[in-house]
Amino acid sequence: MLDNLGEIALYFFATVAGIQICYYLFIFSRVAFYRRKFDTDQPPAGQFSVIICAKDEELNLQRNLPGVLQQRYHDHLKPEYEVIVVNDNSEDDSRYYLQSIEPGYPHYRTIEIKQPAKFIPGKKFPLSMGLRGAAFENILLTDADCKPGSTYWLSLMSQGFTADKEIVLGYGAYNKKPGFLNKVIRYETFFSALQHLGFAMSGMPYMGVGRNLAYKKELFYRHKGFTSHQHLAGGDDDLFVNTAANRKNVGVVIDKKAFTYSEAKNSWSSWFRQKTRHMTTGKHYRFGHKFVLGLFSLTHFLFYPAFILALFFPPPMLWYTLGIFGFKILVQSVIQFAAMRKLDERDLFKFSLFLDIFMLFYYIIFTPALLVKSKNRW
């Protein structure tokens, strides 16, 4: 009887580990071993409209907007891009700051929204207004609290529009700060990028992150903008990509100079609110996307409990269990280390096993958010 239970526990653990190993080898390895190189000296690859939606973001705009306005993306000293800041009903002094810098940047302008849009929560209405006012076909999005990783951010992201690519996914990182919370937030962000960038390169793009996302204006209108989910506060980035992306029209740019950086939340409660808000859109993904993501999350959640359960049985099951565990951790560690180097998160590697185990609590805490109705706010 004990041997039968041991075999069942071993087979269950082996199945869970095997599924995880497949995800790492065939999906996430594409991020780890991404090889495309980008040229910072390449001339402008078309004209761009950079759009930033801001609501009560005066201090963030002062810190980060100059980095967007001073991109090296010009031909014969003339900027080949425009920057549009959509000031959405701000109650601080954003308007005065935005007006004060206009004389110094001829390629910059603002759109003032003074009345809230009824029945369209979040930033979908201001973003739609920014797209409507954009002069160019190529659109690059970021947030007011994000700073480009270099003056080549726009140039490098523009190189993602090759052949039939209509969407370009970039990486939106968080600044490195001391403390456990900062490491948790950065690891979760890295872990999310490992998935959505890896799946995009595998021909199954399912989301993008508005901190660093580009797409064609024509694509936006072809899919009728945010019409299918305009009643939701979130989803202006991930749900739009989930709707408009296909296996051929999405490019990925991984280069430190093309990342954006923002400040992570400094309290557990504020991060919890942020993640809860973000996760409420996941239940609206396509069924196939929900299945592959759910399978990964389920097996990731079960891996360590299944391992502990299998340890209670004597040899030879115990040796098989330890061998499977060791192989899975080896594969995971090699791919995570390489991916962390690509995404400028290598300092997290020494904590990666502990943080991977900590993700068990992440699933327990945030999975119920998939069942919660979205709140209609930014």
Image (cartoon, rainbow, N blue to C red):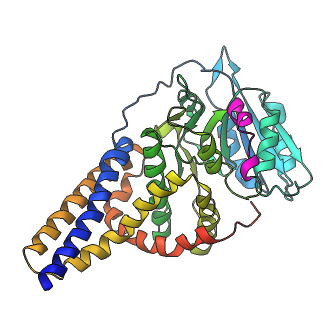
Left or right, residue 201 beside residue 8: right
- Residue 135: image x %, image y %? 78, 27
Point 82% across, 34% down: residue: 133
Q: Is residue 56 above or below residue 216?
A: below
Queried whether the magenta region covers residue 220, the answer comes back as yes
Instruction: Specify the quadrant of the image occupied by residue 360.
Output: bottom left
Range of magenta residues: 217-229
Q: Is residue 330 among what the camera can see?
A: yes
Left or right, residue 354 beside residue 126: left
Queried whether the magenta region covers residue 324, the answer comes back as no
Q: Is residue 267 among what the camera can see?
A: no
Assign the magenta stretch its main secondary structure: helix
Q: Is residue 57 above or below residue 341?
A: below
Point 38% across, 58% down: residue: 348
- Residue 48: image x %, image y %? 68, 28
Left or right, residue 30 beside residue 377: left
- The single residue placed furthest to the left in the displayed view is 316
- Residue 302: image x %, image y %? 35, 71
Nearest the eye: 97 or 18: 18
Q: Is residue 180 above or below residue 263?
A: below
Nearest the eye: 130 or 219: 219
Point 54% across, 40% down: residue: 169
Quadrant the C terminus occupies = bottom right
Number of labelled discs? Answer: 0
Nearest the eye: 179 or 329: 329
